[in-house]
Image (spheres, grey):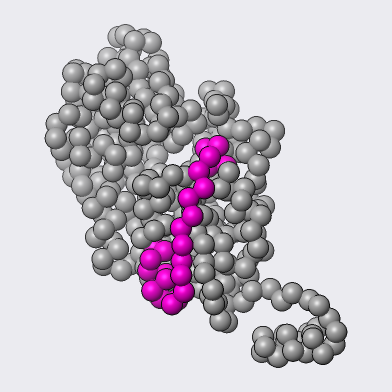
Amino acid sequence: MNILRSLSRGTQVATLALLGLNFTLPAHADGYPNKTVTIVVPFTAGGSNDVLARTVGQKLSEYWKQPVIVENRPGAGGNLGTKLAAKAAPDGYTLLVVANNFVTNPHLYPDGRAGYDPVKEFVPVTQLGRVPFVLVVNPGVAAKSPQELVALAKAQPGKLSYGSAGVGTPHHLTGELFKSTAGIDMVHVPYKGALPVVTDLIGGQIQALFGVANSVLPHIKSGSLRALAVTGDRPAPYLPDVPTMASSGFKDFKSEVWIGLVAPAGTPSDVVAKIEEAARRALRDPGVKASLDAQGLEPTPSTPAALKALMNEDMAKWSKIIKETGTRAE
């Protein structure tokens, strides 16, 4: 078998056939891809994950001269599509777009109910993008900074409420991090998705929200919501006058939605490297960058090692919050 490694792939196949051996050779970067590549998005169409998958997927198709299709497989907080991708052949032809929930769901669905292991069943390829949250309030709330919101909450414990796109979502966990850091009591009101929570915030049914930038930006610009701070490590280019949480007195406070690309465990490293190189090229394309910037999405290509480090960091950070608050997915 060592002799086979020195031969071309076609010669390897022919040699095995002559020997009467029915081995399946693993995929390699030579000739990859030579058929359709599927990118699974474990959420509905239209969200940040989906936008990045389709934007990058279109460029990959151009580079590779092969179809790259995006398949939305929502359900169970992202678990359904993730479990399907975990069972795919590790040949580079099925990829999965992931975000924060990829590493938090196993803690939100205890006893293995998430149905997958993000470390053992997948290999990281590259980070695709990130978007910070924006702490926004209804204009009727008498707070123009995070510190003023904290003062209001301390003066009225249990009276102010903040919304989220659902129990265990990054919006919710960021709100719990804020409560823990500030030492305040605010009521969490979960919704089914980002649209209804923003609608109720504008209507005054809830007072605050850590919203993804692209969902709240139009309402900030129209004046129907007030931005108090962004949760990234630097001001957002589309909200240059809005401070970070850290600069507003909450040292080391950081929470962002990150989006990455992974492949089933066992995918050959040279195939992973080829996908990463193409994705990096796509994210650096001026047209792609302009399109994503307009939606509040910052392209952030990275090495597989950097994505793995980010996943490990987030897993440690949010599993602690989940444990402390007793949060469980519905």
Q: Is residue 253 magenta?
A: no
Q: Position of residue 217 (x, y in %)?
A: 23, 40
Looking at the picture, does residue 51 appear above or below residue 280? Answer: above
Give the x, y percent position of residue 69: 46, 62
Q: Classify residue 58 as left or right of residue 104.
A: left
Q: Nearer the viewer, residue 73 or 328?
A: 73
Where does the N terminus fall, quadrant-wise? bottom right
Residue 162 visible (yes or no): yes
Q: Closest to the observer: 192 or 186? A: 192
Stretch of the chain drawn in magenta: 56-79
Asked if residue 42 lies left or right of residue 253, the reply is right
Q: Residue furthest left?
A: 222
Query: Where, by quadrant of the figure, is residue 270 drawn?
Result: bottom right
Nearer-the-camera pick, 276 or 240: 276
Where is residue 47, by image quadrant?
top left
Residue at 57 percent of width and 82 percent of height: 30
The spot of residue 48 in percent (x, y) is 37, 48
- Residue at 26%, 66% (x, y): give it: 287
Q: Is residue 189 left or right of residue 263?
A: left
**Image x and y of residue 143, in percent:** 21, 21
Q: Is residue 67 magenta?
A: yes
